[in-house]
Amino acid sequence: MLHQVLEQQLRIAVTAVLPDADTASLLVRPCPDPKFGDYQSNALMSLAKTRKMNPRQLATDVVAKLDVSQWCEKVEIAGAGFLNFRVKPDAITQTLQSAFRGEHLFYTKANQPRTIVIDFSSPNVAKPMHVGHIRSTGIGDSLQRVLRLLGHHVVTDNHIGDWGTQFGKLVVGWKELLDRATLESDPIGEMERLYKLVNAQCDADPARLELAKQELVKLQAGDPDNLAIWKEMIRLSQVQFDTIYGRLGVKFDHTLGESFYNPWLGNAVADLLARGIARESEGAVGVFSDGSMPPKEDPFLVNRDGEWVADPALVRKSDGGFNYMTTDLATIEHRLKTWSPDEIIYVVDDRQAPHFRKLFLTFARWQADAAKRVTLRHVGFGKILGDDGKPFKTRSGDTVKLGDLLDEAVERALKVVVEKNPDMTDAQQREIARVIGIGGVKYADLLPNRQSDYVFNWDKMLALTGNTAPYLQYAYARIRSIFRKAQDAGDWQSAISSIQLNAPEELGLARHLLNFGLALEAVGDECRPNFLCNYLYELSGHFARFYEACPVLKAEGAERVTRLLLCELTSRVLKQGLEALGIEVLEQM
Ligand code: ARG
């Protein structure tokens, strides 16, 4: 892409001036204000600073060696040493043409593809998936799509919660209180009912609690009856998960639940103890602060009433059971052995940030060499709130089930669609409503900065105007309708060598198309799909201004071809961009 070509040339020029300079950080990015140019680099200023050079002098020397005349007008030095590049319309035209021929879609694959494991969604067995799961599932899915587009080797792993103390209570409920008929019709509801019932009994009656503990011990020891019940609970839960993932269009390469790691937990703890990384405390085993950082930053400490006290990472309970932490340690080890990733990304609620800080630090102490070869990264996110600013709930105060939420989204979208397209068949209306409804929910979740909480708002997310999925989906369909109306459907395509960008709106749109790859890279680098949402929304804005100012089908000759080409490429980028967010488009809406 153009910015990469310019970066390449800039690196050559800098090396000519300063042969030993580190050129990796020499970036060329879109100019924030088009008044000054299309692209800009501020890299020479920091380079001059580290070398105690005069930045304007360095810029002047570099520009003297910089050969970009094939792509740009004369490079300008601005301010303290910015370089401003103004791209020649010819260079833009050529990029559009090569994109049209399918040589690229304004992005290139990474030169050095990385292997990246993404741990996302990860719901718990025997519980309904709720509205919160849209966050990890949607963000994680979008990241895996973007990173794959950029040529990275991605492994997705759904780390489902299929092990833990709750199964003792669930087994008791299953054996004594199971309603087979309900289990058939609503398995998750029935398991949830059993758990709540037995949990309440355990709170009231120590004998029940003791029974649940015994059932858990039996399960852990491999008792065939309890194992069979547990497996059936996982199977039923997986059916539920798969239904939801099917509706969301989300797939995983692997679903290695927590239970998969059981065989390694004992050894892991023994090893942590032997190496002196973990120690016993009040019958349990935990990893404590090693005092290597200030208390404020140390996740192994908490402040209670003005005093710093230990908040260890527990890896074995006093009853001998293992913890969430233990499983996660064994999981890292397994992932490193199996896939040798450069990076492991955990898309998990920000409330688990302390867990992940402890996990990463513990792993680094435990397997220092392996830890150096991998970047462990917690990609956190905030909460979904209701109108009242409290966590989003149903009217009756229950958590909102994800399946119900998706149903409601599609129903609400259907009303809009029926109003807009009364003449369509019922099946057509339903299909559009599905695509808009699901897309609307997903997009609304990807649009805010992932770490901020956001207020769930049906009207906003399904609106046909504003920064929403339906708006972008309609923009796409509208462009496709231009091609249905164009009588010379294919003819213009043979004339693309004649295109010419003249109107400022044509140029504005074309320049924005060229930045698609930068948007994708920004998403990949920072794990922030919202960058892509905003890019696509701006693209639609550019398109709307272009379409307003530049008639397409009424134009003739080279002008018509140029405009049809811009329409075609805009629709390709919209489609690819929405797809990278996990959002479908339709040719006709
Ligand atoms: N099942 C967990 C939960 O619902 C999330 C798991 C996230 N992944 C991980 N490796 N800890 O809270």
Image (cartoon, helix red, strand yellow):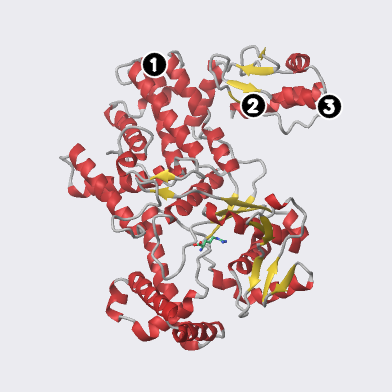
- In this view of the protein, can residue 340 be seen by the observer? no
Q: Identify the amino acid type marked 1.
A: Glu
Residue 315's disc number:
none
Q: What x and y, as percent, mark residue 583?
A: 40, 45
Q: Quadrant of residue 194?
A: bottom left
Q: Secondary structure at mark 1?
A: helix
Q: Which residue is mark 3?
A: 19
Of residue 59 and residue 282, the one placed in the foreground of this image is 282
Q: Quadrant of the C terminus?
A: top left
- N-term mark: 3 or 2: 3
Does 261 sit left or right of 66 as displayed? Answer: left
Residue 38 located left or right of residue 535: right
- Horizontal placement of 126 versus 261: left or right? left
Q: Residue furthest left?
A: 423
Residue plotted at (82% across, 25% down)? 51
Q: Which residue is mark 1?
A: 559
Amino acid type, callout 2: Val
Q: Above or below — where is 284 with respect to 509? A: below
Camera-nearest label, 3 or 1:
3
Which quadrant of the view contains residue 15?
A: top right
Sequence-first disc among 3 and 1: 3
Tell me which residue sits at (71%, 32%) in the image. Answer: 25
- Asked whether residue 152 appears in the rendered view, the answer is yes
Q: Quick one: SS at disc 3?
A: loop
- Among the two numbered marks 1 and 2 on one chain, the one whose residue lies closer to the N terminus: 2
Q: Secondary structure at mark 2?
A: loop
- Numbered tag placed on residue 28 in the rendering: 2
Q: Nearer the viewer, mark 1 or mark 2?
A: 2
How far apart, in angstroms, are the residues tagged by discs 3 and 1?
47 Å
